[in-house]
Amino acid sequence: MDGVLVVDALVAVLAVALLAPLAVGLVPRLPVPQVVLLLGGGILIGPQVLGLSSPSGVQVLADVGLGFVFLLAGYEVDLRLAREDAGRRAVVAWAVSLVLAIGVVGVLAAAGLVRAFVPVALGLTTTALGTLLPVLRENGLLQGRLGRYLLAAGGVGELFPVLAIALFLGSQNRLTALASLAAVAVLALLLGLARRVVREGGRLATVIDRGQHETAQITLRATILLLITLIAVTDEFHLDAVLGAFLAGVVLRRWVGEASPALESKLDAVGYGFFIPIFFVYSGMSLDLHSIAEAPLRVALFLVLLLAVRGAPALLVYRGVLSWRERGQTALVTATALPVLVALTEIGLRNGTMLPQNAAALVGAGVLTVLLFPALALALRERREEPGGQPRPPAGRGNRRRSSGGVRKSRKSA
């Protein structure tokens, strides 16, 4: 594509990226999260409506944006949760979802409605933790006991399907997928050794310490280099790179720990400020509206299945530790899916195993989950009142910091 056309396409995309949060801020009662406005804006400026921009014009930046979605989601996951009740219950809930998904999709396949058995079944077990993080942070749902269970459930619902996709649906064979996992493990080991070397002092430690907050921005540049390298190792962006981005975030969280909270805010600024909005606008431009219009009942079917297969197990698994209201919130949050669904459909369409109408219906259902489920989860919050009778605003609007257990709390946007 001509360079001028690429710039024109980027202008339209960035305009949508700016207008979406402005709309949310100017209309506080707007019952939709920002990501839905980004997707809707992408549809509006895309080739199927106004034709102001083309997905191909921003595809490279969108690929990096999807990488940032998973990098930040992995960075949010605290591996210590796996040793706690929250982690164990999250694994059980996902396993129940997987069994339900296999049974339901088996019935759909027997009826001739589904051809891509594995990607559709895995799609029904996903959770859009990266997409939900801004909403959960801003409304204080990452705090306290509920926050730990939501983070664990979201992390498992994002990591396990991506692991399965990399092993069973990646464009390369399983041996290569396992090798990529081993490479990430080696990377974690090397970063751990590097941390020890840096902590021992010396000129390198001094250079890194001085270069974190000046024009050098060494740690931020190193992180972006890591992410771009994970994307560049493939000819096109596919789930192996997505898996690497997620695990890279987990590794970075363990490597920097509490020693570099500044890196966290910088990654948020670069990711949420530029690359991630471009990815969601790109997804809206790429959405096949004609296929959705031709089979609207498929969208409704997949929407119901996402809630029943992924969300319903939370109502039973978390009994005894969460109230019915919190279990309802957990069910709605875990049933929210989009980025992995987008990647799944791209793989299914690329290898010819997924019907176009099912691919469009899955993404359409994912969009509806982002539109409906977080809003319903917020509506389930208990409304506490001030002594004067006025509703008390939800917690989490102040500065964000890490608790002793590693769960990040809301902070004011910079």
Image (cartoon, grey):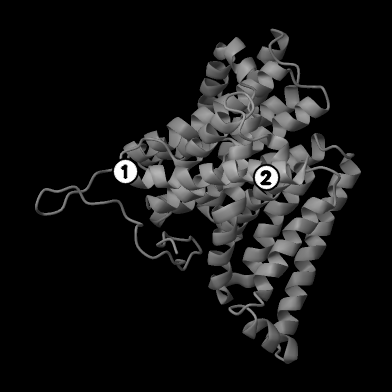
The single residue placed furthest to the front in the displayed view is: 4
The disc, 1 or 2, on the residue closer to the chain's N-terminal end is 1
Q: Amino acid at mark 1?
A: Pro
Whether residue 82 appears in this view of the structure is no
Indicate which disc residue 57 carries. Answer: none
The single residue placed furthest to the top in the displayed view is: 111
Q: Amino acid at mark 2?
A: Ala
Q: Secondary structure at mark 1?
A: loop
Q: Which residue is mark 2?
A: 62
Q: As drawn, is 393 to the left or to the right of 349?
A: left
Q: CA distance from mark 1 to mark 2?
A: 28 Å
Other-residue count near label 1 (Cα within 10 Å), few / some / many at <14 / 14–19 / ≥20:
few
Q: Is residue 413 above or below residue 118?
A: below
Q: Residue at x 54, y 71 (%)?
A: 261
Whether residue 245 appears in this view of the structure is yes
Q: Residue at x 51, y 64 (%)?
A: 406
Q: Residue at x 50, y 34 (%)?
A: 370
Q: Residue at x 63, y 38 (%)?
A: 282
Viewer-proximal residue among 324 and 347: 347
Indicate which disc residue 28 carries. Answer: 1
Q: Is residue 330 above or below residue 408?
A: above
